[in-house]
């Protein structure tokens, strides 16, 4: 039996829905089953029995989770597609800036209202709500908080089709660690105006004005081929240092070495397709 | 049965030798419990797991060398840290383990602090001294101090760092919200440096409310502020109709008229929407005020109140007086005193009054107030602590109206009341309390705010950082915030700058807003003639900005007064205006500068000198820079822009004096002689 990976599940929230309803004198929550198992010794048979007893007692006595029963689907779709919200990034543990919206379609590709959609992901990812029926336009919207570790998180949205077979959609979101968040801050201040072709109301992009186009930082196909050392050289000494565009100025006197490192770790974290140093993908096990 | 037991007793303890033997065995067995417990301990299991994991890696030797068996401990008496987390979390300091995703063996992501200096629990909370998973993270023993969810981890940065950090956006936002959304009007937050957190918002005085608006509007506003303006930061007190009626009755009975805060114009508010819209645009009202457009999007800034339905709110005479001189009604307002003439006031007020929602007050019918209603209203106004935020004549600002929050981040969970279904942790309590304050009991006064989930997370982060440790930190560890200075310019020009509310947008000597450029060294930077002209008719310097300097309609005297003050006082000692002339550079130098501009430094990526060829859209347009900036400023700017304006996006190119001088010569020759128009996008 392995005891890892663990997740800091909070006490008293993991009571299974069907546990017996014994009256519990103590209103304070007990150890959850998982926490109990953490201290069980595999070498002792007697201990095992005691632990099992204690676990079942603890689970049955622990606080009932208030999660509502699953809503009943009134319709079934054949496919599930992303409407918006994939490939976003947020700091570890925090909410994605935009909600994730998915849509359930039937065989003809028309939206299906009333289909049940469930969201799941690696431990630590939270959905609000985690299940829902599609609305009149066939969509379900959920707010997603990413897990506590930097890296990529795979979200799975699933619905059942008419024959009760599971149809799944996988989305990927990116959690930025401290260094990458710092890089993102520097990107917003110094880089984005040229490197991000999208304009917003507050920030007009300079991308279209440049004769030689800069690489958007999500452009993994190109950027993943450039080594960290070369990226550092381009940032500190400017484009001409590597025979690139002279429109890329040298930032070596403006940004510190650790700033440049932070920027590179940000670029690596958000590149698409992912770079090798982007870290592991956290998926539901 | 009884016989069996007694024969067993006989067999074991029948004679003294036998009894001695059995007791000895039991004694030995119990002695073995302690070493066995140690042998089968959880941390040992993890250490074996770690060794198994690294065995097959290419860097096994290095990892093996770093590995130390046994319980590891980081002991920092100054911080009260006894952390044994590294007994199981064995790969924290191994950067080569980035590909490992199973805990407890992951490497720690790079942060600016060393593990040995701060330990683990300073940031992550939890029980540092425990050596089992459950006790360390979230067992009943860790009840008061469970592991902090990653969502709120930035709160720990805030224990020592009192100012904003580039790597902690959530904490920075939370702290801003605490002071901007009015939290600290009611809740006292004492900071560890002895100061008290100050509110940065300025809720309006209600002492003269009857001059400004109608009782019907106040009634509707009290009932649901967001129905009038969705961006309003006024919370909803969930008042009954009767309570809202009585409070409005009191506020209007209590209101006294103010001289000059209403004005009857010779011209009636004009209803020329085109002229009104263009004056609204020219005056850059949208830099501070938002209006919801037909598509439902907010257009404009969030410095001043939203104006979508302003015509339903204000009285025409008050609006006219306000537009003529806002300082007559509110001397401390951040609204500039535009020197509008009567026809302009009439056009603009007509335009704004047209922004009305006829349905908004259609169902509000109030009878004249009775004395009982007024008395009851006064009691309600005092009970709800309205005077904590608003100035109300005759009602003193209550002290300690709401619980102090200086140590909320260490509040024991045993002192908290939880709602059904909530996790029993402090972060969850704080977040839920902000989300639905009235759900926690009958008769609670805290009103309902309209924070987004992300804002609630930020606020919770900021509140968790206010805890026992942040309050008792050794002074050597605290990192002070740069205090906001209360710089005020002196004399006549100073009065003028207050009147024009320059500090609502510009920052000078560490005081003021951040919407417009910092003007601390403006006197070294620009030429006198240009500044006078700019005051009279501000042009576009940065084509990509949507927020611009408005025209205040200054008189010649005022423009000169301001310019003289700026040119004399806001001088940078690095920039010696007399050392570099504005003309007389050789053609060769200008040519060299041009080559450097387009070649070596490729400035055209961000700036425009020749509108026919250049497209750079980030920095200011330089077509007229020779008649705008001083040569000495350009030269120093080339040498080190961050020294003159910290945080500017202009990169420091570490230019030689020679290059900087040539570029100065080239730029100072750009006087915009030929009529060049900025390419419009």
Image (tube, coloured by chain):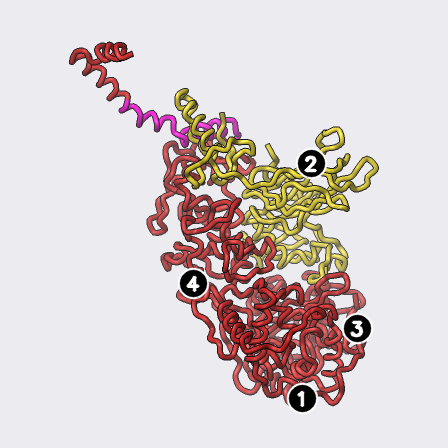
Chain colours: A yellow, B red
| Label placed on residue B191 | 4
Q: Chain of mark 4?
A: B
The part of the image, by quadrant, that contains residue A174 is top right
Q: Work out which residue is located at the far right of the displayed protein and give it.
A: A108
Residue A137 image position (x, y, % from top left): 77, 46
- Element on which disc 1 rests: helix
Residue B47 image position (x, y, % from top left): 43, 30
Is residue B57 or residue B345 the one in the foreground?
A: B345
Q: Are marks 2 and 3 in contact (CB under 8 Å)?
A: no
Stretch in magenta: B30-59
- Element on which disc 3 rests: loop
Q: Nearer the viewer, mark 2 or mark 3?
A: 2
| Label placed on residue B677 | 3
Q: Quadrant of the C terminus of chain A?
A: top right
Is B630 rendered above or below residue B171? Answer: below
- Element on which disc 4 rests: loop
Q: Nearer the viewer, mark 1 or mark 2?
A: 2
Mark 3: give few (<14), some (14-19) or many (20+) Cα within 10 Å. Answer: few
């Amino acid at each position: 039996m392995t005891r890892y990976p663990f997740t800091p599940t909070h006490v008293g929230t993991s009571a299974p829905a069907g546990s017996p309803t014994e009256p519990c004198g103590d209103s304070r929550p007990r150890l959850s089953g998982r926490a109990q198992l953490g201290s069980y010794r595999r070498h002792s048979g007697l201990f095992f029995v005691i632990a099992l007893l204690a676990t079942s007692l603890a689970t049955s006595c622990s606080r009932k989770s208030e999660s509502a029963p699953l809503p009943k689907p009134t319709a079934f779709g054949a496919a599930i597609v992303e409407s918006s919200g994939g490939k976003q990034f947020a700091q570890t543990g925090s909410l994605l800036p935009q909600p994730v919206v998915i849509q359930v379609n039937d065989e003809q590709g028309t939206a299906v209202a009333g289909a049940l959609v469930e969201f799941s992901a690696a431990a630590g990812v939270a959905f609000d709500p985690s299940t829902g029926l599609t609305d009149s336009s066939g969509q379900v919207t959920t707010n997603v908080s990413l897990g506590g570790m930097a890296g990529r998180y795979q979200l799975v949205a699933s619905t059942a089709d008419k024959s009760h077979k599971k149809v799944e959609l996988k989305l990927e979101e990116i959690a930025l660690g401290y260094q990458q968040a710092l890089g993102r801050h520097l990107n917003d201040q110094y880089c984005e105006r040229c490197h991000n072709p999208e304009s917003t109301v507050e920030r007009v992009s300079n991308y279209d004005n440049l004769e030689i186009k800069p690489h958007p930082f999500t452009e993994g196909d190109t950027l993943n081929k450039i080594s960290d050392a070369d990226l550092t050289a381009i940032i500190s000494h400017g484009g001409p240092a590597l025979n690139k565009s002279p429109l890329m100025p040298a930032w070596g006197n403006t940004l510190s070495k650790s700033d440049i490192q932070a920027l590179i770790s940000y670029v690596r974290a958000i590149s698409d397709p992912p770079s090798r140093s982007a870290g592991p993908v956290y998926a539901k096990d | 049965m009884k016989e069996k037991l007694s024969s067993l007793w006989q067999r074991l303890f029948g004679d003294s030798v036998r009894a001695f033997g059995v007791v000895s065995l039991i004694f030995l067995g119990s002695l073995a419990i302690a070493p066995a417990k140690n042998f089968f301990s959880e941390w040992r299991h993890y250490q074996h797991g770690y060794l198994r994991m690294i065995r097959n890696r290419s860097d096994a030797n290095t990892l093996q060398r770093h590995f130390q068996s046994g319980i590891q401990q980081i002991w920092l008496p100054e911080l009260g840290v006894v952390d044994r987390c590294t007994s199981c979390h064995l790969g924290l300091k191994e950067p080569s383990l980035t590909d490992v995703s199973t805990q407890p063996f992951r490497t720690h992501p790079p942060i600016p602090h060393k593990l040995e200096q701060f330990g683990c629990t300073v940031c992550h909370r939890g029980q540092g001294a425990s050596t089992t998973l459950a006790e360390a993270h979230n067992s009943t023993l860790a009840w008061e101090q469970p592991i902090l969810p990653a969502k709120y981890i930035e709160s720990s940065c805030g224990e020592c760092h009192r100012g904003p950090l580039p790597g902690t956006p959530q904490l920075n936002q939370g702290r801003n919200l605490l002071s901007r959304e009015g939290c600290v009007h009611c809740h006292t937050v004492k900071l560890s440096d002895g100061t008290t957190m100050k509110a940065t918002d300025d809720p309006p005085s209600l002492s003269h409310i009857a001059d400004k608006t109608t009782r019907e509007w106040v009634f509707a506003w009290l009932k649901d502020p967001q129905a009038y303006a969705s961006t309003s930061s006024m919370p909803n007190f969930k008042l009954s109709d009767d309570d809202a009626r009585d409070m409005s009755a009191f506020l209007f009975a209590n209101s006294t008229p103010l001289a000059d805060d209403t004005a009857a114009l010779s011209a009636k508010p004009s209803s020329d929407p085109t002229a009104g819209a263009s004056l609204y645009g020219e005056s850059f009202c949208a830099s501070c005020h938002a209006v919801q457009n037909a598509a439902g999007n907010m257009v404009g800034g969030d410095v001043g109140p939203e104006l979508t339905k302003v015509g339903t709110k204000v009285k025409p005479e008050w609006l006219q007086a306000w537009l003529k001189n806002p300082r007559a009604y509110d001397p401390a307002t951040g609204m500039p005193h535009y020197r509008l003439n009567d026809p302009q006031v009439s056009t603009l007020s007509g335009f704004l009054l047209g922004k009305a929602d006829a349905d908004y007050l259609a169902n509000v019918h109030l009878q004249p107030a009775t004395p009982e209603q007024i008395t009851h209203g006064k009691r309600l106004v005092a009970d709800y602590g309205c005077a904590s935020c608003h100035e109300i004549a005759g009602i003193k600002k209550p002290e300690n109206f709401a619980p102090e929050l200086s140590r909320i981040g260490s509040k024991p969970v045993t002192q908290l009341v939880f709602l059904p279904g909530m996790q029993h942790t402090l972060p969850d309590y704080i977040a839920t309390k902000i989300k639905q304050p009235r759900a926690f009991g009958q008769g609670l006064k805290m009103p309902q705010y309209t924070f987004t989930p992300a804002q609630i997370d930020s606020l919770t982060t900021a509140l968790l950082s206010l805890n026992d440790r942040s309050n008792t930190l050794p002074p050597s560890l605290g990192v002070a915030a740069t205090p906001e200075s209360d710089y005020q310019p002196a004399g006549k020009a100073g009065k003028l700058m207050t009147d024009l509310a320059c500090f609502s947008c510009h920052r000078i000597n560490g005081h003021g807003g951040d919407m417009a450029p910092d003007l601390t060294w403006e006197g070294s930077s620009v030429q006198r003639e240009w500044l006078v002209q700019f005051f009279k008719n501000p042009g576009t310097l940065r084509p990509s900005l949507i927020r611009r300097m408005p025209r205040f309609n200054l008189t010649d005297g005022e423009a000169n007064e301001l310019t003289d003050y700026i040119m004399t006082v806001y001088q940078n000692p690095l920039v010696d205006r007399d050392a570099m002339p504005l003309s007389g550079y050789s053609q060769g130098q200008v040519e060299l500068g041009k080559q450097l501009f387009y070649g070596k430094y490729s400035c055209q990526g961000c700036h425009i000198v020749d509108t026919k060829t250049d497209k750079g859209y980030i920095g200011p347009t330089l077509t007229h820079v020779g008649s705008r900036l001083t040569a000495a400023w350009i030269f120093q700017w080339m040498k080190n822009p961050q020294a003159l304006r910290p945080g500017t996006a202009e990169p420091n190119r570490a230019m030689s004096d020679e290059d900087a001088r040539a570029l100065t010569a080239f730029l100072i020759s750009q006087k915009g002689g030929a009529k060049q128009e900025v390419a419009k996008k």
